[in-house]
């Protein structure tokens, strides 16, 4: 019997969704009908979370009520910080998030209830706690005490505040909000798919989310932003960019991180916005090193990919690297920041999955040996 193999599940649709649509040929991304370019320009991360979890953007009263709902959940149990203090300082922060999610399950006596009201309750907890966990670990590994969340600040400002104890400027808060809005949701990407596939067994939200965190960490997915920064650090100057790109492409299966996408054949609209933010930060700071290197990398890649007839453009992780660098974040915090945002999209997918579930159970075509003659242990 003939079987079609869809390697990497390319071209496979696992269900319908109301959350997000990507048009990879036009370079369009919409969250529940709203163009990402307009959202990035005009709304806060909280408004986007509300949009992803409901049918529409909140009005002023709904937004205030949502913020009030989230506020008490910013704090995390001391057990999480205590465990962080025991970790080696070198542990990847994504492992810290993943273990924190499991600890939160341990402290939730309703963890296994996958009724939609309870799933929404857990979603509010997780979206509020992720920034506290990421900022808290950054403090702890520097030998400092975590800073308690500020009751008057939103998620973007609070994240920056919990890193330093200083109320961030409006400009820094806005950049953070834009980054969080842009990373919130992206259809059936690897980690959202993993969240849905895990939930499709009707296991609990915490298990689905910790699986998604593990998936996001990989360098072909959310880990790419950290890999971009590593590459830029290694290259160190505009003059070295061309050599780096050519050497990388000359390697078998060589990949320049931050480029390429399964869905986009034109420039990722998120990359266009982040490129603008990176340019702005470079001008404001008077230090354009990271932006200039990124521009040169984009130029050389465009030329080289054109020669190969490939549509490989910068993706969301490419310019977010220089943006995060200019905001002063350490490289291994870039992917955790992605998680701080993407938890909102994962939760939206879990609502859809639990609301109308069918277990995900694809198949593999067996190509191994058959009919082997069994030998007892003593004869092998
Ligand atoms: N550098 C060089 N060539 C590339 C790249 C790249 N980054 N991406 C794709 N190509 C080429 C690739 O060589 C292949 O050509 P050929 O068939 O001649 O070997 C062709 O484009 C198709 O690539 P693919 O790897 O088969 O495409 P995919 O859809 O399976 O993988 C991807 C998509 C994003 C994993 C891949 O483009 C990649 O590895 N990029 C680098 C990692 C990265 O930036 N990941 C972030 C993804 S976007 C946001 C997110 O999820 O976090």
Image: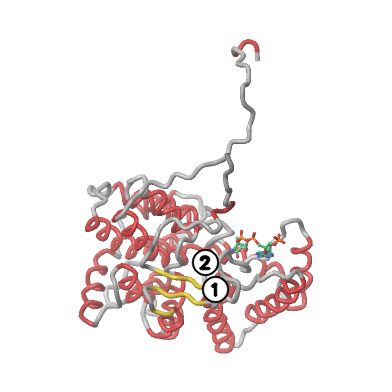
Q: Are marks 2 and 1 in contact (CB under 8 Å)?
A: yes
Q: Nearer the viewer, residue 255 or 200?
A: 200
Q: Earlier in the sequence, mark 2 or mark 1?
A: 1
Q: Which residue is drawn at 34% across and 55% down?
A: 353
**Coordinates of residue 22 in the picture (x, y in percent):** 48, 71
Q: Quadrant of ligand 1?
A: bottom right
Q: At numbered mark 1, what does the secondary structure look like: helix, strand or loop?
A: helix
Query: Within 10 Å of the Cα at label 1, are there few (<14), some (14-19), or many (20+) other Cα atoms?
Result: many
Q: Nearer the viewer, residue 353 or 220?
A: 353
**Coordinates of residue 216 in the picture (x, y in percent):** 50, 58
Q: Which residue is drawn at 60% across and 75% down?
A: 266
| Mark number, residue 320 | 1
**Coordinates of residue 259 in the picture (x, y in percent):** 63, 69
Q: Can residue 224 be seen in this view?
A: yes
Q: In which quarter of the image is residue 253?
A: bottom right
Q: How far apart are marks 2 and 1 (CA)?
A: 8 Å
Residue holding disc 2: 334
Q: In which quarter of the image is residue 294?
A: bottom right
């Amino acid at each position: 019997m003939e079987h079609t193999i869809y390697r990497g599940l390319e071209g496979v649709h696992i269900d319908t969704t109301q959350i997000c649509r990507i048009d990879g040929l036009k370079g369009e991304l919409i969250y529940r009908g709203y163009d990402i370019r307009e959202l990035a320009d005009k709304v806060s991360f909280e408004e986007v979370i509300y949009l992803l979890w409901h049918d529409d953007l909140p009005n002023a009263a709904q937004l205030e009520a949502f913020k009030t709902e989230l506020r008490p959940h910013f704090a995390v149990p001391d057990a999480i910080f205590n465990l962080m203090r025991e970790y080696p300082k070198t542990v990847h922060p994504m492992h810290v998030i993943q273990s924190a999610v499991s600890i939160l399950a341990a402290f939730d006596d309703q963890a296994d209830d996958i009724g939609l009201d309870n799933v929404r309750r857990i979603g509010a907890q997780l979206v509020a706690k992720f920034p506290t966990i990421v900022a808290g670990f950054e403090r702890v590994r520097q030998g400092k005490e975590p800073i308690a969340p500020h009751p008057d600040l939103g998620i973007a400002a609070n994240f920056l505040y919990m890193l330093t104890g200083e109320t961030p400027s409006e400009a820094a808060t806005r950049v953070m909000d834009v980054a969080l809005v842009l990373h919130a949701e992206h259809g059936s990407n690897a980690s959202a798919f993993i969240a849905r596939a895990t939930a499709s067994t009707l296991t609990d939200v915490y298990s689905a989310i910790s699986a998604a965190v593990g998936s996001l960490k990989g360098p072909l997915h959310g880990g790419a932003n950290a890999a971009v920064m590593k590459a830029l650090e290694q290259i160190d100057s505009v003059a070295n960019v061309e050599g780096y790109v050519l050497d990388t492409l000359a390697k078998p299966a060589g990949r320049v991180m931050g480029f390429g996408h399964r869905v986009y054949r034109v420039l990722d609209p998120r990359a266009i916005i982040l490129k603008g933010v990176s340019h702005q930060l470079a001008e404001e700071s008077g230090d354009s090193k990271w932006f200039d290197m990124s521009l040169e990398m984009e130029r050389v890649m465009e030329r080289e990919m054109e020669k190969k007839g490939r549509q490989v453009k910068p993706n969301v992780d490419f310019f977010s690297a220089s943006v995060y660098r200019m905001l002063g974040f350490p490289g291994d915090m870039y992917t955790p920041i992605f998680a701080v945002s993407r938890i909102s999209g994962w939760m939206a997918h879990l609502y859809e999955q639990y609301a109308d579930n069918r277990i995900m159970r694809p198949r593999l075509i067996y190509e191994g040996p058959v009919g082997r003659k069994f030998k007892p242990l003593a004869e092998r």
